[in-house]
Image (tube, rainbow, N blue to C red):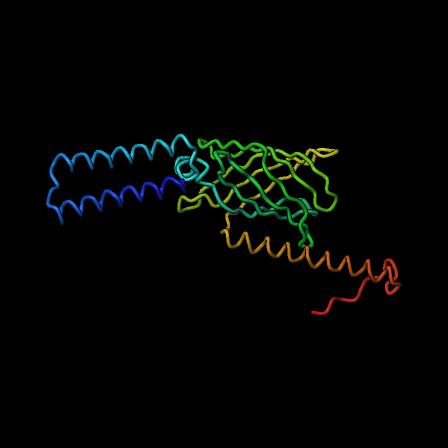
Amino acid sequence: MERVLPAAFGGIVGLLVTLIHDHLLTKTLSWPISASLFGALSIGAILLFVYELISNSAGFLRLTSPISRVEGAWAITIMKNGNRPESVCKIYLSHGRYIYTGYGISADGLLGSEWTSRDVHYDKKIDELSFTADATMVGTGKRIRNYGYIKFYKDAKGKYTYGYGYFVDMADELNHYHMKLTRISDEQFDEKINKVFNNVSSQIALDKRVEYEQSTGRLVPGQDPQPLRQ
């Protein structure tokens, strides 16, 4: 798309320059030439449409894809999961594939997990998304497979703003969780993630400080360090 649009724009500008030159300067523009130029423009538009169609253009697919109605950022509240009570995710189309990816946030505000879908299917008739994904538990580095589904609902204005579903973690034992999704803006998504990663950076700094003070004998193992100066 990025290569085609500049080329098409350049072609149109070139044709307009030809029209202006012939009409205003040489006065030689005639009906056959006008018809030829119109035909060239029409053929160019058709070729551009065909190119977009066969090249799986993200812009073209996004306009025609049923998942566009739920595309965007979502906040997730996970029921009865004290370790990861909330998450944030994004649903979008990339290179002709549906993507469902996100981050689990632990109860202390740190990054608890992250996942990316392996396969996503969206049924537009019933507004349901089903998925399988690979997740990584940040604390242990353990990778697990999960699957689940989400049913989306419209608000009074006809916009898809919330959903309910579940997912199953296929770890050493199966863990089944229910979840509620609420649409958020990209800015809210970034704000939540930036806060999480700032917390992670602070925790890493604190861990390194504890390790150093223990190694120098300033801190007895099991003793809490003094708060960092702000």
The image quarter containing residue 42 is: top left
Q: Position of residue 214 (x, y in %)?
A: 86, 60
Residue 218 at x, y percent in the picture: 86, 65
- Residue occupying image coordinates x 68% and y 41%: 136
Pick the front one: 4 or 185: 4
Up/down of 26 relative to 143, above or below = below
Query: Residue at point 50% right, 47% down?
Result: 183
Q: Is residue 118 left or right of residue 10?
A: right
| In-image side of 166 versus 230 (left or right) | left
The extreme bottom residue here reads 229
The quarter in which the C terminus is drawn is bottom right
Q: Residue at x 58, y 54 (%)?
A: 192
The quadrant the N terminus occupies is: top left
| Residue in the image at 58% along x and 36% along y | 117
In this view, the residue farthest toward the front is 26
- In terms of depth relative to the viewer, which is nearer, 28 or 130? 28
Residue 134 place in picture, x, y as percent: 64, 36
Rendering coords of residue 196 (x, y %): 63, 54
Asked which quadrant contains residue 40, the reply is: top left
Front-lying residue, 15 or 89: 15
Number of marks: 0
User: For this view, does 212 lie left or right of residue 78?
Assistant: right
Task: Depth check: give the residue in front, 156 or 29.
Answer: 29
